[in-house]
Amino acid sequence: MMAQFSRFRLKGLVFLAIVVFALPLFISNPFHYGLATQIALIAGAVVGLNLLVGFAGQISLGHAGFFGVGAYFSAIMTSNYGWSAIPALVVGAIGVAIIAWAVGRPILRLKGHYLSMATLAVGFIIAIILNNERELTGGPDGMPMPAFDVFGWELSVFGQYSLFGMDISGDLAWYLFAGVILLAAVWLAQNLIDSPIGRALRSVHGSEVAASVVGVNTAKYKSLVFVISAVYASVMGALYGHFQGFITPSIASFDFSILLITMVVLGGMGSTIGVIIGAVVLELLPQVLADFQEMEMMLFGLILMLTMIFMPKGLLPTAANYLNKRRSKSAGGDA
Amino acid sequence: MTALVEVNNLSKAFGGVHAVEDVSFSVDAGQVYSVIGPNGAGKTTLFNLITGLYTPTSGEVKLNGESIAKLQPNDLAERGMCRTFQQMQICMNMTAIENVMLGRHLTLKSNLLTTLFRLPSLTRGEKAAREKAAELMEFVGCGEYLDTEASAMSYGALKRLEIARALAAEPKVVLLDEPAAGLNAVETAALEELIRKIAEQGITVMLVEHDMKLVMGISDRLLVLNYGRVLAEGTPEQIRANPDVIAAYLGG
């Protein structure tokens, strides 16, 4: 099976790479690049959240909080203290890992609704702090964030760059950068899933008792996956902030947490490529339905509900199932 | 010979119900040791106490001379105790062989770095684990299901798969909770053969079972529980001749 799974895994990654690198052939408008960059970065966070929700079967309704902490830590250190982007991102991620570990140890003992409530509270606390620490965060008005930089080289949407001898705009450069980050996020997540650690994580979802009697320390693995998914959110949050150039506490809000969870559920829990599709659909939807902006949350709620009722496995797994059935049916017809 | 598993005055009460009361016995290494008794006699509760899923109200369990009553199931697996369940515990979100490979968890050393970057040491370990798992699935008789999703397997195959998973952890003692429940006569005969083969490898087997023919045929010793208490203990011949056992089973 591993050979099979590996091949399947590679297929997903190759498919994603083709989509990411072919997209610039079809769009050229800076607004579209911006949207695609934003989707790629949020999808990265969703891939991390899927490790927790889809594979390990634990819920988090406060993941935007970690996204927010990553973004704000980077913003504060780069804007106010002159740090370079990468050290700020790394130290922020370590900080988020410590926070997630500290809150994860006690709350992951909870199950079902109790775990949801506890993660919800963590998210709310973070959002409240970001809103109220005006000195540091600018409060509800938000704060600016400098361009992403690597050893003095800056990546800005307003810049002009050359790649393999081609001149490319800052928008396209950011998009390609975000695309590579997303591919890396997917690659790492897939490696994690197809490993002893990944099996231990999935067994926590499948049967915690079975896992424990063959020696899996389930508490340890729940904490581990909570930390990993929080670090994903933190890193993506920091990059998202650099890309936007300005952040507000809304990126740590309850609404955003729900949006992230909805992306996972809609795309297909436990399907890495599926949840990216979920992120694409739910980020594009508000663009299409701009007239109904005030009803956005209602719409997301409705999508979440309908998905749970009519395709609990999510978009991609349901579609794959459907195609497989049709294929085997027609194969049966031929025989 | 020292006892591998030793149970001393073990009791478990759920509120006012004494599910297991003052039970003592010991199992020598290499034995097939069965626990029998009417429904509700406390057999599964006893297994849950031994394997750390329940905490005893009083008394103690020793594995290789070490008291284990306060340890978690995963600590017990590290010390060589593994089990299957009456209500099967299979990870339905995985394939058959992945379930068995999960049993290799303790023998697979992996850290986050080798995992995330899929370094060669991880791939090697995984390959070896897969081979071992395939071998075990062949051994228990579900070798044809390697890459089948667990959710698509039959009840009988899943029961064997659960035994393969327990064996994958290379236990010293394996506890099987009603492995024959729901199996037909042919499958039960195959199971008897399998338990014999497991015992031949030097693995101690503890069994909770209702199928008397199976139990009497393969057990070295038996423990009979009734209303949570020990009714009798001894070899199959002794148990068969015991008037208390006959009375409990035939309602005399």
Image (cartoon, rainbow, N blue to C red):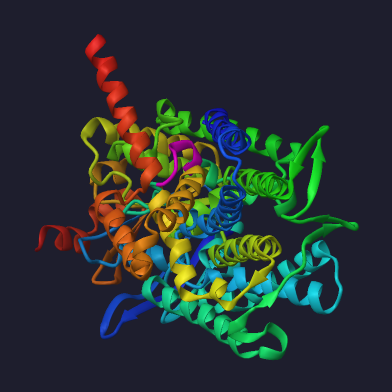
Q: Residue furthest right?
A: A152
> In the image shown, does A248 or B17 lie closer to the viewer?
A248
Question: Is B97 a magenta residue?
Answer: yes
Q: Which residues are magenta?
A: B93-99
Give residue A26's position: percent from left, percent from top: 56, 35
Quadrant containing the C terminus of chain B in the rendered view: bottom left
> In the image shown, does A252 or A116 lie closer to the viewer?
A252
Establish if B87 lies above or below A165: below
Quadrant containing the N terminus of chain B in the rendered view: bottom right
Give residue B58's position: percent from left, percent from top: 43, 82
Q: Residue at x 50, y 55 (%)?
A: A50
Counting every numbered tag in the picture gives: 0
Q: Left or right? Give the position of B109 relative to B186.
A: right
Q: Residue furthest top?
A: A335
Give residue A211's position: percent from left, percent from top: 49, 56
Establish if A132 lies above or below B233: below
Give residue B162's position: percent from left, percent from top: 41, 44
